[in-house]
Amino acid sequence: MPGLNFDSCNFADVYCEADKVIALNLGDPRAGSPGLISRLDSAIGKLSALAELSIVPDRIIGTLPQTLSQLKNLRFLAISRNLISREIPTNLAELRSLQMLDLNYNQLRGQIP
């Protein structure tokens, strides 16, 4: 994810408005997405205009980055059917615009803040 910029808007499953990434819909086999095998990089927090993040289903491992709380415009967050583990970050409570959250079928512990 580091270095996402104007050129990133040319990739499938990346949606932009005014040269800013507003939606990432990765891993949807119905859309022909090749899927991901990786970790969710903390640089995701630099996508200040991001309103929708969907990584369903895939093989994302590791933890949810604390930087998700920097996505103040985020309305839709679906990272289900992955291999995310550890605690649900408490700072997700800072996502005041969030309307839909789907973290099903991971290995997460704790309560949704």
Image: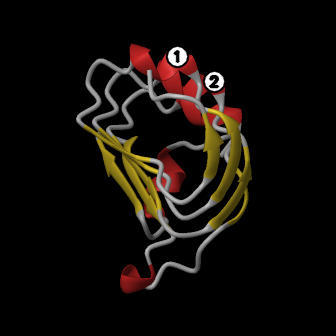
* The C terminus - image quarter: top left
Q: Residues within 10 Å of mark 1 (few under 14, many from 20)?
A: some
Where residue 84 sits: x, y (%)? 67, 50
Left or right placement of residue 25 versus residue 42 in this view: left
Reply above or below: 67 against 108: above
Reply above or below: 102 against 91: below
Residue 36, disc: none
- Measured Cα–Cα span from mark 2 to mark 1: 7 Å
Q: Residue at x 65, y 68 (%)?
A: 36
Where residue 73 sits: x, y (%)? 31, 27
Which residue in the protein does label 1 denote? 91
Q: Residue at x 28, y 36 (%)?
A: 75
| In the image, farthest residue toward the front | 110
Q: Could you tell me the amino acid type at mark 1? A: Asn
Q: Which quadrant of the structure image shows residue 15?
A: bottom left
Q: Secondary structure at mark 2?
A: helix
Q: Secondary structure at mark 1?
A: helix
Q: Could you tell me the amino acid type at mark 2? A: Gln
Left or right placement of residue 70 versus residue 84 in this view: left
Q: Residue at x 63, y 24 (%)?
A: 66
Which residue in the protein does label 2 denote? 66
Q: Tell me, yes or no, whether the two marked residues, 2 and 1, touch with CB atoms within 8 Å.
A: yes
Where residue 47 sits: x, y (%)? 49, 33
Where residue 18 sits: x, y (%)? 29, 39
**Of callouts 2 and 1, the N-terminal one:** 2
Left or right placement of residue 1 versus residue 103 in this view: right
Q: Residue at x 45, y 29 (%)?
A: 112
Which is more toward the observer, 95 or 49? Answer: 95
Q: How many marks?
A: 2
Which is more toward the observer, 71 or 107? Answer: 107
